[in-house]
């Protein structure tokens, strides 16, 4: 029995524990990468929508006429979905790309109006003044423990996350 060569139970347990630790680290790291990619996608999409809508807002009458079919009559049903940021004294318009009931014809019409393609999320717009429009991401994007609904919020929080 002396001089037996082989793996002891203790060394085998240590190797298994090390493998489990490495696997859990890689799973957590990949989850962070997926979150970062999702946030980047939301960020780019809301930036694209915001920029294109601002170009249409140079003329208030044109803006209102263009988006009139998408006007929200009852903001209370959407207010919670944008972090309670909507005010009763303003007019809002829904770009319902990700909404149930939005037909392909409506999506195609929005694509032509905004000159965009492959938008997956829904947005709420409000005309502020010439060249200035508020754009809210419906249902927001989760970064850490918080949800963010505007380009500025997403940009600020995303910048803070990537600096860490």
Image: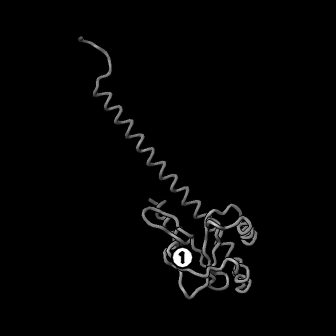
| Rendering coords of residue 67 (x, y %) | 70, 79
Residue at screen point 61% across, 84% down: 91
Q: Quadrant of the C terminus?
A: bottom left
The single residue placed furthest to the left in the displayed view is 2
Q: Check disc 1 and report the residue beneath it.
A: 77
SS for callout 1: helix
Residue at screen point 62% across, 65% down: 100
Total numbered labels placed on residues in the image: 1
Note whether 13 is above or below 79 in the view shown.
above
Note whether 111 is above or below 56 in the view shown.
above
The single residue placed furthest to the top in the displayed view is 1
Residue at screen point 62% across, 77% down: 125
Q: Is residue 6 left or right of residue 25?
A: left
Q: Quadrant of the N terminus?
A: top left
Q: Is residue 158 left or right of residue 5?
A: right
| Rendering coords of residue 117 (x, y %) | 71, 63
Label 1 Cα crowd, 10 Å radius (few <14 / some 14-19 / many 20+): few
**Colour treatment of the image:** one colour
| Rendering coords of residue 153 (x, y %) | 51, 71
Note whether 51 is above or below 30 in the view shown.
below
Q: Is residue 86 left or right of residue 27?
A: right
The single residue placed furthest to the front in the displayed view is 101
> Picture quarter containing residue 113?
bottom right
Q: Is residue 121 left or right of residue 161?
A: right
């Amino acid at each position: 029995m002396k001089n037996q060569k082989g793996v002891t139970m203790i060394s085998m347990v240590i190797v298994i524990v090390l493998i489990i630790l490495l696997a859990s680290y890689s799973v957590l790291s990949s989850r962070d990468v997926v979150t970062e990619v999702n946030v980047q996608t939301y960020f780019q999409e809301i930036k694209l929508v915001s920029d294109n809508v601002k170009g249409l807002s140079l003329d208030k009458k044109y803006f209102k006429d263009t988006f009139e079919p998408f006007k929200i009559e009852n903001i209370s049903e959407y207010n919670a979905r944008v972090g309670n940021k909507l005010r009763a004294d303003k007019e809002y318009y829904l770009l319902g790309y990700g909404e149930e009931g939005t037909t392909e014809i409506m999506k195609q019409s929005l694509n032509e109006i905004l000159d965009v393609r492959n938008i997956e999320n829904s947005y709420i717009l409000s005309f502020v003044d010439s060249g200035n429009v508020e754009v809210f991401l419906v249902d927001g994007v989760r970064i850490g423990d918080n949800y963010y609904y505007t380009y500025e919020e997403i940009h600020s929080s995303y910048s803070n996350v990537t600096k860490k």
